């Protein structure tokens, strides 16, 4: 609660049977979600299983994406399996070329909710729906962080995303460029889990993903998150000076390009 108002799963989406089962088995309050591949009677007792989880920020398909997320590692597979990766979206924005900053200034991305982060189809969703017709909120590509006041690149999720006002082809091309840039290894931190680790991250200023791991391994993490604020556009993003922390890295990147 020191980080904000806790969110229960029911505040974000209908709690499914696996989540309710996990909370009962692990004797946890509704503010905690169990991320695990364990099963009971052949059915999942938590969420996300053992497959790969693609790059995303949590609940970008909501008007107010969650502000922060926390994971506590209780059981972890063999060393090197199920690593989690984080991208710094401040650095990703500040190292964009001026040309790209001009291209994305004022643009918004509509976030659909067709598949989950394990790329599984949501109940009732259809893959053949035109992305322009999907329901979902639109968030600014360049947003001002509600707490720090800094500009950041906000991409949310790649699947079912659409840059408003562009043709589908142009939207896809721009999204591909932005995602390729944002997920460059130079902006990435890799966390190799150990039992007892607690990782807390800023959900709105980062992207994250997870490696797959062997289904025979046991992986149990407790997750919690706090309410966030609606994202607002950075009106003068192009004219803002780069943050000193990333000015040197920007200079190095430009020298490599030249």
Image (cartoon, helix red, strand yellow):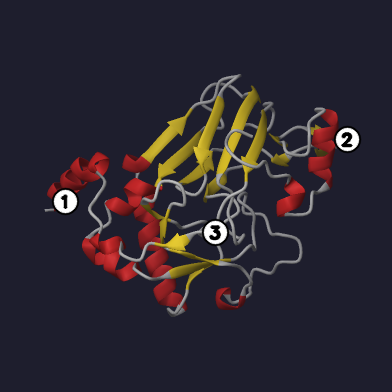
Tell me which numbered mark, 1 or 2, is placed earlier along the sequence: 2
Where does the image place residue 37, in percent across and percent down from the top left? 71, 35
Identify the residue at horizontal 31%, vertical 41% (top origin): 186
Residue at 60 percent across and 50 percent down: it is 117
Task: Identify the mark at residue 254; answer none if there is no mark.
Answer: 1
Q: Please state the horizontal and vertical placement of residue 246, each as a whole percent of the image.
A: 25, 43
Q: Quadrant of residue 43?
A: top right
Residue furthest right in the image:
41
Q: Earlier in the sequence, mark 3 or mark 1?
A: 3
Q: Which residue is mark 2?
A: 41
147 vs 208, nearest the viewer:
147
List the residue tagged with mark 3: 230
* Spatial CA span between label 1 and label 2: 56 Å
- Spatial CA span between label 3 and label 1: 33 Å
Q: Work out whether residue 151 or residue 116 is closer to the camera in this orientation and state it.
A: 151
Question: Where 72 falls versus 165 (above or below)?
Answer: above
Q: Earlier in the sequence, mark 2 or mark 3?
A: 2
The image quadrant where one finds the N terminus is top right
Specify whether residue 1 is in view: yes
Tag 1's secondary structure? helix
Left or right position of 228 against 45: left
Secondary structure of the residue carrying numbered label 3: loop
Could you say which is closer to the camera, residue 47 or residue 72?
72
* Cα gap from disc 2 to disc 3, whole angstroms: 41 Å
* Disc assigned to residue 207: none
**10 Å neighbourhood of mark 3: few (<14), some, or many (≥20)?**
some
Residue 16 lies left or right of residue 236; in this view the side is: right
Left or right? Give the position of 122 relative to 248: right
Front position among marks 2 and 3: 3
Q: Does residue 183 appear in this view?
A: no
Q: Position of residue 6 (x, y in %)?
A: 67, 41
């Amino acid at each position: 609660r020191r980080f904000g108002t806790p969110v229960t799963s029911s505040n974000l989406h209908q709690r499914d049977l696996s989540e309710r089962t996990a909370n009962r088995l692990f004797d946890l309050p509704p503010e905690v979600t169990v991320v695990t591949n364990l099963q009971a009677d052949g059915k999942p007792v938590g969420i996300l299983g053992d497959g790969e989880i693609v790059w995303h920020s949590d609940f970008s398909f909501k008007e107010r994406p969650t502000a922060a997320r926390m994971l506590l590692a209780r059981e972890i597979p063999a060393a090197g399996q199920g690593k989690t990766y984080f991208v710094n979206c401040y650095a990703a924005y500040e190292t964009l070329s001026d040309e790209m900053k001009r291209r994305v200034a004022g643009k918004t991305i509509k976030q659909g909710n067709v598949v989950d982060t394990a790329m599984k189809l949501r109940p009732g969703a259809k893959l053949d729906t035109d992305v322009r017709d999907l329901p979902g909120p639109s968030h600014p590509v360049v947003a001002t962080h509600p707490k720090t006041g800094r500009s950041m690149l906000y991409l949310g999720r790649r699947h079912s995303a659409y840059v408003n006002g562009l043709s589908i082809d142009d939207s896809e091309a721009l999204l591909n460029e932005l995602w390729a840039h944002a997920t460059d290894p130079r902006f990435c931190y890799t966390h190799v889990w150990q039992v007892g680790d607690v990782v807390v991250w800023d959900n709105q200023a980062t992207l994250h993903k997870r490696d797959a791991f062997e289904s025979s391994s046991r992986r149990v993490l407790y997750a919690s998150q706090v309410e966030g604020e609606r994202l607002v556009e950075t009106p003068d993003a192009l004219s803002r000076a780069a943050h000193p922390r990333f000015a040197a890295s920007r200079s190095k990147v430009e020298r490599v390009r030249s």
